[in-house]
Image: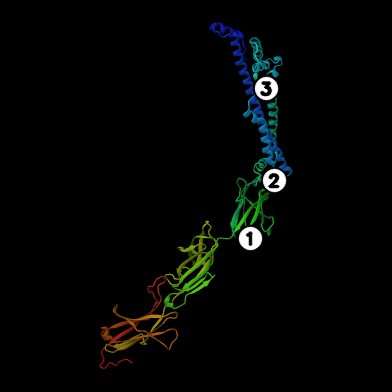
Amino acid sequence: MCRFDPDIAENMATQIKSPVTTDDLVGSKIDRYVGQQLKRTSQQVRLSDFVTGIIAVISFALAFFIFAAIIDAWLWPLTPFARAVALTLFAGGIGAIFWLTVWPLMVGKINPQYAAKMIEEARPGFKNSLLNYLELKRDQRPVHRAILNEVSKRAATDLSQVSIDSAVDKSNLIRFGFVLVGLVALSIGYLIFSPKSPLPTVMRVLAPGARIAPPAAVMIQSVTPGDTAVFFGDRLEITAQVTGTHDVDDVNIVYSAQDAQIVEAVMPMQYSGANGIYSAILETGPTGIQQPLNYYIAARDGVSPTYAIDVRPNPSISINSIAITPPKYTHLPARTIAGYGEIQAVEGSKIEINAIANLPIDVAYIVPLIADDESAESGEYRELRAIPMKSDGRQASGQFVAALNSNRNRPLFTHYKMKFRSTNDFQNDQANVYAIRVIADLAPDVEIVEPAQKEIAIPVNQPFPVEVWASDLDYEISSIDLHIDHLGTRILDRNLELEVDGQSEGGRVIAGLQLTPSDLSLEPGDKAIIFATASDNRISPGSDLPDPNISRTENYTLIVTDEIANPKEPK
């Protein structure tokens, strides 16, 4: 510690031969010296009191949470209201201590008289010399210079003999330091040796509205999905991380229906074998979750917060009506069926499906399905290219044509379903499947009734008749054609005029033609093949172009013989 020497000031005044007196130089240096020491003392006092205040705040926080943890874990789990009250008390206590101890030091100044008094109390031999000096400096009345210099010298001399660090009273800082050390040791001991961690209590108090489970020997964390919503009939996987002393058989989901039809039902959870993760598939029946539920995870004394499962109606699209318009050639009337999805229609019919969904539609489409022989029994289907539907709000409509496959042995697609995506991105993953039955337009029956024999011999100049009968079991015969081939060359293609056979049922028609071999450029010894074809009036599905069913008779053989003298006209 530096000491004040008045001889230095006197020698300086003599050397520079200044008009300033030695007393003036001595007084100025004493003022600076005393001021610096008082400033250092004030800074030490501010630092000591500031650290004491911070320690008091930390000590209060630790003591508060230790007390709250004991109550929450062992006496009475804090309700949300109690946690809110505890947070209010905690914030009020911290604020009060900070306001009384730390805030004044941040905005105020240390009075020099307070610092001087603290220095003099540290060294009783001062006899108030420092306080007297400050009082004389503050006194507005004139004081004789000699008296002021004498008091200044005495104060400076006494001040030079005191260590500023030891002059500041740190007893409060030491006491609070011991309190803090004790509380830290208690907190660490509680954290290490207590089976119930105090950390959940800290979080529960700081966030009184959060759903945080009270302290327990078994901790249940990371419950997923927590609050959620599922579609009717869905199954829900629930997982949780469980730590603490417990057996793998202790962890269960406890669930109740919000309408009280199910109360505290228990479902065991399975250990995944890693990081304390348990999981289970929650369902309330063979078809999944069917009503809103509340659930929580329980393991010994550990209980998670309670979560809610909302059950939404499955996104669904149902058939409002189906309009079936048969091809015009069938002369069948159009018809509309309502509320029924299975379709039975004549080949070539236009099918228009009008549907309504339970959610606003973003996009909808018809999915044609094929049930192969192997997959029909298992209910599995092969999907074909989707048919887009027009949508407006919750309504949609789409069209397709009832058709047979290329082999005409089954429908082009045997079943169908409707899929849609709602405007909020939900999809009907469990779409109903409907069957389609397509009634084929049967091929006509056709036969040559005249001549009666499969092989006939006709003179080259003898006329002979050919008569063909044809009928169609479902619709109408549109044409009958007679064909004659000779040596692989078609020598006759004749469309015959039709006549309805009023004597028969089933719409049979008759067509006939009288032929002479010579008119066909046939000569004696030639052989020709005679056959007929009949076409019905089927129209190609999806177009107005004819695509009839065509049937063919057996072949009849014509053998041309020599000319006769007087040929007779056939009856």
Of residues 276 and 169, the one nearer the viewer is 169
Dividing the picture into quadrants, the one containing residue 104 is top right
Which residue is situated farthest in the right direction here? Answer: 75
Q: State whether residue 55 is above or below residue 557.
A: above
Instruction: Give residue 535's mark.
Output: none
Q: How far apart are marks 1 and 2 (CA)?
A: 38 Å
Along the polypeptide, which appears first: circle 1 or circle 2?
A: 2
Q: Position of residue 303 (x, y in %)?
A: 68, 48
Whether residue 508 is situated above or below residue 379 in the rendered picture: below
What residue is disc 2 on?
Answer: 81
Which amino acid, mark 2? Answer: Phe
Q: What residue did someone put label 1 on?
A: 285
Q: In the shown orientation, is residue 305 left or right of residue 439?
A: right
Helix, strand or loop at label 2? It is: helix
Instruction: Indicate the position of residue 162 as horizontal and vertical percent values.
Output: 66, 16
Q: Given this view, does label 3 or label 2 mark the residue nearer the observer? A: 3
Q: Distance between the residues labelled 1 and 3?
A: 81 Å
Q: How crowded is mark 3: few (under 14 residues within 10 Å), some or many (20 or more)?
A: some
